[in-house]
C-alpha cells in the first residue's frame, strides 16, 4: 500500500486502539467481574484496517468468533486441573497430576483446538479470536462479565472502524453484516442506516480479488 494509505491505517488504528485501552482501563478499575484485556484487539485492528475487504474482518465474524471462543474457554475450564506442585513432569505433563484432573496445558490445547474447529464449522473464522479460548481456559479472572465487556469493545471497534474507514474513497467497511453483501442487498436497511448500493461494483471487485475465481467463458454453451 502507498505511504498515504499506510499513514491513514496508522491514524485509524491509533485512535481505535487508544479508545479500547481507555475503556479497558476504566472497566478493570471499576469492577474486576468485567475484567478484559484491551491488547486482545491488536490483531483484529490489523485485519480491519490493513486487510479491510477480508471476510475474516467483517462484523459478523468478529462478534460470533469472540462469543464462540469465550464459551469454549469457559466450558473447558470446568474440567479439574491437577495440582502444580508435583516435582516430576514428563514432556506432556501427564504424570501423577492426571489422577486429580487434566493437566492445564492439555486444557489449553483443547480450548484452542475446539475454538479453531468450531469457527471453521460455523463459518465464523476470525483468527485473533482464538486467543480468547486460551485466555478463558487459563485464567479464572475472566468470567461471564468479561463476555459482556468484550462485546461492548466489539461495538466500539466496529463503529469507529466504520466511521474512519469510510472517510476514505478507497475503502469500504463493512462489506456485509450477517452474510448479506451491500451489493446484493441493494438499498438494504440495517439498524436504521441505509446501505450504499453504489458500492456494488467495489464489492464485486473485492470478491473477485479474494477468491481469484473470475473466469471469462466464450463459445458454444453446448460444449460445457
Image: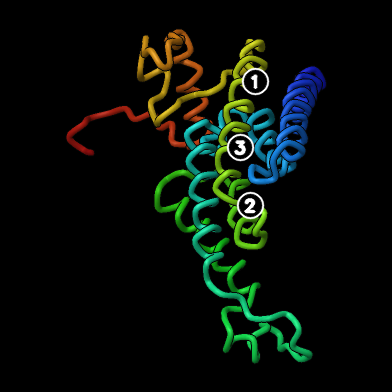
Q: In terms of depth relative to the viewer, which is nearer, 82 or 72? A: 82
Q: Residue furthest front?
A: 31
On the picture, is 5 further left or further right than 157? right
In percent of the image, x 77 and y 35: which residue is there?
Answer: 25
Q: Residue 22 got which mark?
A: none
Mark 1 vs 2, N-terminal side: 2
How many numbered marks have been drawn onto this rendered protein structure? 3
Indicate the position of residue 124 as horizontal and vertical percent values: 46, 44
The secondary element bearing badge 1 is classed as: helix
Instruction: Give the spatial CA distance, label 1 vs label 2.
Output: 25 Å
Residue occupying image coordinates x 71% and y 89%: 90
Residue linked to disc 3: 149
| Image quadrant occupied by the N terminus | top right
Q: Which residue is mark 1?
A: 160
The residues bearing labels 2 and 3 have C-alpha atoms spaced at a distance of 10 Å
The residue nearer to you, when weighing 150 against 34, is 34
Amino acid at each position: 500500500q502507498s505511504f498515504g494509505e499506510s499513514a491513514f491505517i496508522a491514524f485509524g488504528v491509533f485512535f481505535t486502539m487508544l479508545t479500547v485501552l481507555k475503556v479497558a482501563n476504566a472497566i478493570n478499575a471499576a469492577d474486576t467481574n468485567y475484567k478484559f484485556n484491551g491488547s486482545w484487539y491488536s490483531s483484529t485492528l490489523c485485519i480491519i484496517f490493513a486487510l479491510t475487504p477480508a471476510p475474516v474482518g467483517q462484523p459478523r465474524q468478529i462478534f460470533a468468533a469472540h462469543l464462540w471462543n469465550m464459551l469454549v474457554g469457559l466450558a473447558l475450564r470446568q474440567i479439574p486441573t491437577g495440582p502444580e506442585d508435583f516435582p516430576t513432569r514428563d514432556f506432556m505433563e501427564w504424570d501423577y497430576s492426571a489422577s486429580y484432573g487434566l493437566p492445564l496445558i492439555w486444557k489449553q490445547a483443547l480450548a484452542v483446538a475446539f475454538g479453531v474447529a468450531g469457527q471453521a464449522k460455523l463459518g465464523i473464522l476470525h483468527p485473533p479470536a482464538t486467543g480468547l479460548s486460551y485466555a478463558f481456559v487459563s485464567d479464572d479472572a475472566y468470567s461471564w462479565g468479561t463476555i459482556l465487556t468484550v462485546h461492548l469493545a466489539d461495538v466500539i471497534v466496529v463503529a469507529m472502524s466504520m466511521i474512519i474507514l469510510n472517510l476514505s474513497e478507497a475503502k469500504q467497511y463493512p462489506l456485509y453484516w450477517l452474510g448479506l453483501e451491500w451489493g446484493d442487498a441493494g438499498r438494504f436497511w440495517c439498524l436504521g442506516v441505509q446501505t450504499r448500493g453504489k458500492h456494488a461494483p467495489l464489492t464485486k471487485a473485492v470478491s473477485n480479488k479474494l477468491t481469484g475465481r473470475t473466469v471469462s467463458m466464450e463459445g458454444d454453451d453446448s460444449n460445457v
